[in-house]
Image (tube, helix red, strand yellow):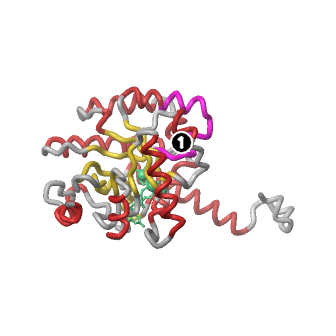
């Protein structure tokens, strides 16, 4: 890229790049330290079964409590964690903590499942299957209670190795979900080649529904396609009742978004007396 810019030809690191590099190095050191200081924690966002109005699942989402008390969102550190390989250690923590939380939810009588985001970089690391197996045993959690959320990118690079690994995880019982569906280099053929169970329609497609006719057409097409392949569909970013009604009409399976709940701390997850649940249920019936 440096070559293309024409000016600055002789200067490999422009001042801005130098600053960026220093910031990235600082962030890397901070993430490394945060892992040892246990500054990462998980919040959970309910996923609603639209037919019943019940909470079917929760998605674990990572947060970083900095030493000054500031809570940092994943968009600001996941990319660096991926580039430095630190996502492998962070991802193990996330998987383990999700299993621990799922065990607590199951112990309190909820037949709930857990969605866990997995970075493509974690697939490159040795021993991911072994580590996941250990954590399942440690918390007596069954693989089929867990959905692994992967992105379309994973299905494209290093094709053959990834397909094997995803197949292994699927054979173990994990449900495989394609996150942010429609935003990548969507090739529908991979939905047949990979053992995919669920597609999650990206929130950018839910925005503006039902006024935005392009999004309406896209969401209809995705749901129809998923149904014909017998995949389950989750809509992300459901913020308005109009979104909810539209998705119910199309018989979308599940939905997730601020309309139902923001991601919350585990202690604030009240699955049996969820405030929005009754309201949503009434709407449906
Ligand atoms: P994602 O997996 O697609 O997660 C959904 C994101 O949408 C979450 O942002 C969630 O808080 C947000 N969201 C949920 N409902 C709504 C809504 O109604 N409106 C809007 N505008 N947003 C909504 P979050 O927690 O900031 O996470 C951002 C991304 O960071 C995630 O996107 C995922 O790609 C990544 N991420 C988060 N947690 C993890 C993790 O534990 N591991 C890995 N590898 N990536 C993670
Ligand atoms: Mg996700
Ligand atoms: Mg998503
Ligand atoms: Mg996303």
What residue lies at 19% left-to-right and 46% top-to-bottom?
A: 105
Residue 68, image x, y percentages: 37, 68
What residue lies at 18% left-to-right and 42% top-to-bottom?
A: 106
Relative side of 215 to 92, left or right: right
What residue lies at 46% left-to-right and 39% top-to-bottom?
A: 229
Residue 108, image x, y percentages: 13, 45
Residue corresponding to mark 1: 121
Q: Is residue 198 visible?
A: yes
Q: Is residue 93 above or below residue 256?
A: above
Q: Quadrant of the C terminus?
A: bottom left
Q: How many marks?
A: 1
Q: Is residue 275 visible?
A: no
Name the foreground residue: 30 vs 88: 88
Split into quadrants, the picture shows ligand 1 in the one at bottom left
Residue 155, image x, y percentages: 56, 39
What residue lies at 62% left-to-right and 39% top-to-bottom?
A: 157
> For numbered disc 1, what is the local secondary structure?
helix
Please say whether residue 223 is one of the residues in the magenta stretch: no
Q: Is residue 266 above or below residue 140?
A: below
Name the foreground residue: 170 vs 41: 170
Judge: label 1 CB < 8 Å from ligand 1: no
Which corner quadrant of the image does residue 53 belong to? bottom left
Relative side of 34 to 190, left or right: left
Q: Quadrant of the N terminus?
A: bottom right
Residue 194, image x, y percentages: 51, 34
Name the foreground residue: 227 vs 236: 227
Q: Which secondary structure type mostly characterizes the magenta part of the structure?
A: helix
Alpha-carbon neighbours of circle 1 within 10 Å: few (<14), some, or many (≥20)?
some
| Region in magenta | 149-166
Please say whether residue 161 is one of the residues in the magenta stretch: yes
């Amino acid at each position: 890229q440096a070559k293309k810019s024409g000016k600055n030809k002789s200067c490999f690191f422009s001042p801005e790049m130098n600053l960026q590099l220093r910031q990235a190095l600082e962030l890397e050191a901070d993430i490394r330290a945060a892992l040892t200081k246990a500054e990462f924690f998980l919040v959970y966002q309910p996923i609603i079964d639209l037919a019943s109005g019940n909470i079917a699942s929760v998605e674990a989402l990572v947060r970083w409590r900095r030493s000054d008390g500031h809570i940092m969102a994943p968009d600001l550190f996941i990319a660096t964690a991926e580039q430095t390989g630190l996502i492998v250690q962070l991802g193990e923590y996330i998987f383990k903590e999700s299993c621990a939380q799922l065990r607590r939810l199951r112990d309190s009588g909820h037949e709930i499942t857990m969605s866990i985001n997995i970075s493509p970089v974690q697939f490159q690391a040795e021993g991911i299957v072994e580590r996941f197996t250990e954590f399942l045993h440690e918390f007596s959690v069954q693989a089929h209670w867990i959905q692994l959320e992967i992105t379309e990118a994973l299905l494209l690079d290093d094709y053959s190795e990834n397909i094997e690994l995803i197949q292994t995880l699927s054979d173990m019982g994990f449900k495989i979900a394609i996150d942010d569906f429609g935003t990548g280099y969507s090739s529908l053929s991979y939905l047949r080649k990979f053992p995919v169970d669920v597609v999650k329609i990206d929130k950018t497609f839910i925005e503006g529904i039902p006024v935005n006719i392009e999004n309406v057409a896209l969401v209809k097409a995705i749901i129809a396609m998923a149904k014909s392949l017998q995949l389950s569909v989750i809509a992300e970013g459901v913020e308005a009742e109009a979104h909810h009604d539209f998705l119910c009409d199309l018989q979308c399976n599940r939905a997730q978004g601020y309309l139902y709940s923001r991601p919350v701390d585990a202690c604030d997850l009240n699955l049996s007396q969820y405030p929005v649940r009754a309201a949503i249920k009434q709407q449906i019936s």
